[in-house]
Amino acid sequence: MMKKRRLSVFVIVLIVIMGIASIQSTQAHERRVGERLGDVLNTDIRVFINDVQIMGYNIGGHTYVVVEDLRAYGFVVVWDGITRALHISKGASSEQARIIPDNLQPVGSVAFPFLYSDIVTYIGSERISSFNVDGSTVTRINYIADAFGRYVWDGAKRELRVFVDGEAASIGQIPTIAQPTTPTPTQAPTLAPTTPPPTPSPTTPPPATPTTAAQATQNRPAIVFWVPNGTVWHSTPNCRSLARSRDIRSGPTPPASITRRCSNC
């Protein structure tokens, strides 16, 4: 009888010890907000949404984008402070897409850490994985492509393009914008002149009509500076308009789309 009682006490003590160990183990595995989960790596992959570039991040071999940045790419991102949730849906852009500089850091090197966050992210009613990177919430670009369109990977160009609403005609083919047709001008009837046209005086030279392109070329220095997707060229890289630009190009001739000089330099 005494042996059975001792055995029962031993079993109870053992169960209590195992329960305490289980609780401690569970508490040890609970994530803390701001806990470092890993590293974001530098990548040479460029990411686009409907041909507009967006900043991409390499986490665990997958490409991530900032959820808040999607507001400039045809999405509505709503923050619910009560449930600490971000909700992504399609809609009109409420922000302007920024110019994305080329990443000149070595591919695979550590850019910064990514952290655990208690903020949850939803597409519709479906919860998707997300992390905290540099104070912003990031999620995989695949989730956006699967929910709203498709994505195309070009290994030769190292480009990942997401097309929403069937913008991609086929895999690997980027849709082209149709050029507007020029209407055929209506020919005015030819009228016989009643008097001969006046002969200009030889002492009066005809007025000069220089073209805008010629003026721009004449006033342009030997080396000019510009940024990709910009509309003006600069005479100096120290122009205050370029203060926040990281990708500044230079050369004797800017791209054909850049025809005006910056008014600040």
Image: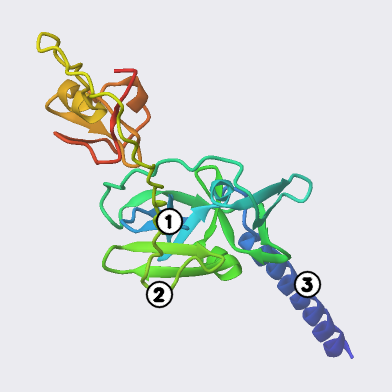
C-alpha distance separating marks 3 and 1 = 61 Å
Residue 16 circle label? 3
> In terms of secondary structure, where does tag 1 sit?
loop
Q: Is residue 60 visible?
A: no
> In terms of secondary structure, where does tag 3 sit?
helix
Question: Of the residues shown, which amino acid type is indicated by label 2?
Answer: Ile
Q: Which residue is farthest front? A: 194
Kindly identify the residue that appears in the image at 28 percent across and 63 percent down: 157
Q: Which quarter of the rendering shows the N terminus? A: bottom right
Q: Between disc 2 and disc 1, whose residue precedes? A: 1
Residue 76 point in image, percent of width and height: 65, 50
Q: Up-down: is 179 above or below 243? A: below
Q: Between disc 3 and disc 1, whose residue precedes? A: 3
The residue that label 2 is drawn on is 171
Q: Is residue 231 visible?
A: yes
Determine which quarter of the picture holds residue 101: top left
Kindly identify the residue that appears in the image at 71 percent across and 63 percent down: 124
Mark 2 and mark 1 in contact? Answer it, CB < 8 Å.
no
